[in-house]
Image (cartoon, rainbow, N blue to C red):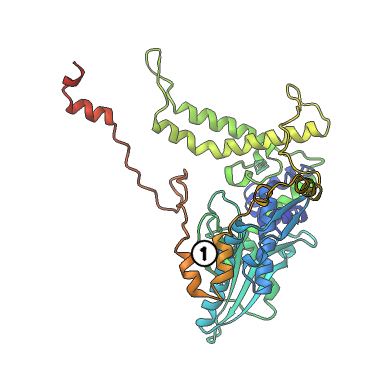
Amino acid sequence: MSEAEERQHALLSPSSAWTWITCKASTAAQLGQPDDSSEYADEGTAAHELAKWCLDAGNDATAYIGRIITVGEREFEVDDEMAGFVQTYVDGVRERVEAYKLAGATVEMFVEQRLSIEHITGEKGAKGTSDCVLIACFADGHTEICVIDLKYGRGVAVDATNNYQGLMYAAAAVEEHSDFYSFRTVLIVIHQPRLSEKPSEWSLPIADLVDFVEKTAKPAAEQAMLYVESVDFAPLALSDFNPGEKQCKFCKAKAVCPALAAHVEETISMDFDQIPLSTLGDAVHMLDNDRLGVIYESLDLIDGWMKAVRGRIEVELLAGNAVPGVKLVAGRKGARKWSSTDEAETLLKSMRLKQDEMYTFKVISPTQAEKLLAKESPRRWKKVEALVTQADGKPSVAPEHDKRPALVIEPAVDEFEVVAAEDDGGDLV
Ligand code: SF4
């Protein structure tokens, strides 16, 4: 089950733990709000399904290229790109199992295991699904539980350290297996193959996990459920909310949350207060890099809120509810396609078109070639591999605290300035 599906099944799910722990009003505020499952979230669900197939069957992801995975009303074809990223995760899990074994441990693996979280949140029958749980028992009696999470998004890099979702899965997995094992350490691993080949990891003693459950998760869950039970007769106060980029990001109340709207307004006015628009009499200066940097810090929050408001307006209009000042119009027509591929093929053939006019052929991709040759004929694969190139990732903007090293780009030399300095202008006369 994906994070998006998990959120629909439990009010206090592990994947939304940061939200309900950080903003105590959020659970009550989301009641009755529409779910806006995005194509990206559904694509993530498809990638999880593929990863499960691989780990369960011991296959590589390329074995499933061309297979269709249906998520809700959307269909996703396993292509080279999805297979490649999912394989990075699958390899990571397999390498970890091997590493445990090399260190002398016996290992058990549970893929997509449904885990009860009722003992943490108090919500009857609530469960979460951990992508992968490994239990490693070492000869000296040390037993480690490792919860591994696959995040398929391209968004912000997620750190395993103090990750509430990871801690919830770990606490649930410990409870599930504690009849048979006595765990000493917990390892939380987060794979984000579209952002990095290496996962983020955090190891903690079991006592710290117990502390998190008792001092953070349980009191927050109790408070959240109290608001849920009383919201009908005791409306939420603004002080019950705690807006912020991370907790509001996946909150279903985002579009209509008065606290977030006020927070965005406050953020914009605070940030823009730091930007003197007029510094010399009535002259207005263009924004310089210092000012752009100040604005950058608030962009994700503002952008997320704007998208949520746009989405909600669309949902209201599609449901036939009026939103003053806005209307629905017909969008661009879709791409043209054959109503019947078979009939089109027969008709084109009857017109005596040549094969290369009628069909497009494509040489197989490097991933497919590797699947075909690497195991059966490593020497042939080596020759083919020499023809494979891979473009570097395009530079992208990230906040200062991002863990990836900053690219060093030399500012472009202003050629005109250089020439002007050396040139006495004689040629122009
Ligand atoms: S949008 Fe943010 S502030 Fe509003 S309820 Fe959700 S998490 Fe809390």
**Residue that protrudes farthest toward the top in the picture:** 282
Task: State the residue in front, 400 or 379.
Answer: 379
- Is disc 1 surrounded by few (<14), some (14 to 19) or many (20+) residues within 10 Å? some
Q: Quadrant of residue 36?
A: top right
Q: x, y percentage for residue 39? A: 69, 47
The foreground one among 145 and 238 is 145
What residue is rendered at 16% in x and 20% in y?
A: 426
Q: Nearer the viewer, residue 161 or 56?
A: 56
Residue depicted at 56% across the width and 48% down the height: 155
Quadrant in the picture for residue 101: bottom right
Q: Is residue 331 shown above or below 146?
A: above
Q: Is residue 71 above or below residue 147?
A: above
Q: Which residue is mark 1?
A: 201
Q: Eyeballing the image, is 208 above or below 26? A: below
Please state the horizontal and vertical placement of residue 66, each as a whole percent of the image. Answer: 68, 60
Residue 245: percent from left, percent from top: 58, 43
Q: In the displayed structure, does residue 144 sit left or right of residue 428?
A: right
The residue positioned 66% from the left and 62% from the top of the image is 65
Toward the viewer: 225 or 134?
134
SS assignment at label 1 = strand
Q: Amino acid at mark 1?
A: Glu
Percent x, y of residue 30: 74, 44
Identify the image quadrant of the N terminus.
bottom right
Is residue 39 visible in the rendered structure shown here?
yes
